[in-house]
Amino acid sequence: MVLELEETVVMKNTNGHAIELNVKQGEPTLVKPAEDTEKGLYFLSNLDQNIAVIVRTIYCFKSDEKGNEKAGEVIKNALEKVLVHYYPLAGRLTISSEGKLIINCTGEGAVFVEAEANCALEKIGDITKPDPETLGKLVYDIPGAKNILEMPPLSAQVTRFKCGGFVLGLCMNHCMFDGIGAMEFVNSWAETARGLPLKIAPFLDRSILKARNPPKIEDLHQEFAEIEDKSGTSELYKDEMLYRSFCFDSEKLEKIKMIAMEDEVLDKCSTFEALSAFVWKARTKALKFLPDQQTKLLFAVDGRSKFNPPLPKGYFGNGIVLTNSICQAGELTEKPLSFAVGQVQDAIKMVNDSYMRSAIDYFEVTRARPSLSSTLLITTWSRLSFHTTDFGWGDPVLSGPVALPEKEVSLFLSHGKERKSINVLLGLPASAMKIFQELMAL
């Protein structure tokens, strides 16, 4: 039954016509695991501690063969079953005796809400640009929650649309898993909905990433370095923020790689390296950093295969580590693109077992958070196969994030039927966005 909360948003669809998205949310219920599961405290590693932010994503489904009447029921029943394997998601975050985040496996359950929208799914328009105001209606936020301890690790909302399509909106805490882990969980949930066994069972023991005793810090870890804002960029950020999406098709991506390689400084160059360097350089120019202003690039590297021994298949948790590159803005903007690509390549090369173990120990000793001052943080979703999640209504027709978590974040998403294009999403102050847009024209 749908009652209670009613949210209305006026938005423009892709043709620019204003339409009104009205979503009626039902009463939230708690979905407990279908069987008794382990109780007690569940350890989160230091790689989990640093990124305890809520990530909101939506998956849009529309099948020609099948209506949406049973969508809520099917997805809810499958959640009960999949939570038996992923039981920490049915617990609650708390603070350990060491002052760190830990899960209390209470079996209380994930939050689940059914909702109804007043229009057809296609009216949502283009979700390739995060639009928290509109898309936020399709996920369930805990009313009045002041911090992450008051939010369950997982809440789900199924919104049925008039056309027979529906949207699954998820709020998940990043401390529970990184993109690969989240993708494995959602795909396991979808397999369960289709009556299939799990392709990848979760490996739950995160203590394999415990800090060493005594801790051994072997690297500089400049990802935590606070950079002085010599350029007065914080003033610029008082301006109106604009969020834009830039699509790089395979032709454009090849062109950027060619520009990076043309002075023959580099032996090779991947799409990620070239695009990251290109965006970092353009954003630094757009924000008008002074030549002697330091600028930092941060991005996550999947450490699963780089640990020694590698993390087990299905590792449930964050297996990513942040790496960084710091240089002067003048160097970055004046030198050829090959210089910026070289910086990205060096940052990737840095990540090995000792670097990652050192990062874990660094947090143990300092409890520091990575600093985002004068920084671009790139999050890459372009390698994640969220678009293959099938709950029984086929693959999602669209999937993506609801919003960008921080103003310093840029998101890379795969795009198009063959996933060969990459959408770059970011927010900048209006004056800087104007310059950035001009620099994107290749």
Image (spheres, rainbow, N blue to C red):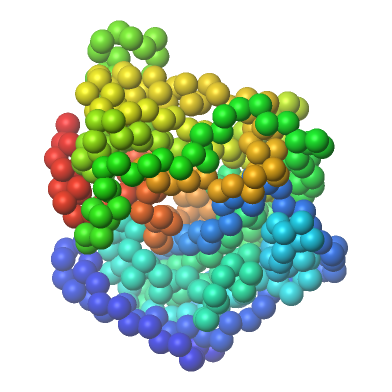
Residue 174, image x, y percentages: 58, 55
- Quadrant housing the N terminus: bottom right
Residue at 16 percent across and 63 percent down: it is 15
Residue 357, image x, y percentages: 69, 33
Residue 87, image x, y percentages: 75, 62
Q: Nearer the viewer, residue 417 or 41?
A: 41
Which quadrant of the view contains residue 266? top left
Residue at 43 percent across and 57 percent down: it is 405
Which quadrant of the view contains residue 82? bottom right
Q: Is residue 432 above or below residue 335?
A: below
Residue at 52 percent across and 81 percent down: it is 143
Residue at 64 percent across and 58 percent down: it is 189
Which quadrant of the view contains residue 7? bottom left
Q: Nearer the viewer, residue 225 or 103?
A: 225
Q: Nearer the viewer, residue 145 or 9?
A: 145
- Quadrant housing the C terminus: top left
Q: Is residue 337 above or below residue 419?
A: above
Q: Is residue 416 visible?
A: no
Q: Is residue 196 visible?
A: yes
Describe residue 409's horizontal placement relative to residue 156 as left or right: left
Q: Is residue 26 above or below residue 408?
A: below
Q: Is residue 250 above or below residue 129?
A: above
Which residue sits furthest bottom?
4
Q: Nearer the viewer, residue 355 or 231?
A: 231
Count of labels in the image: 0
Residue 364, image x, y percentages: 70, 44
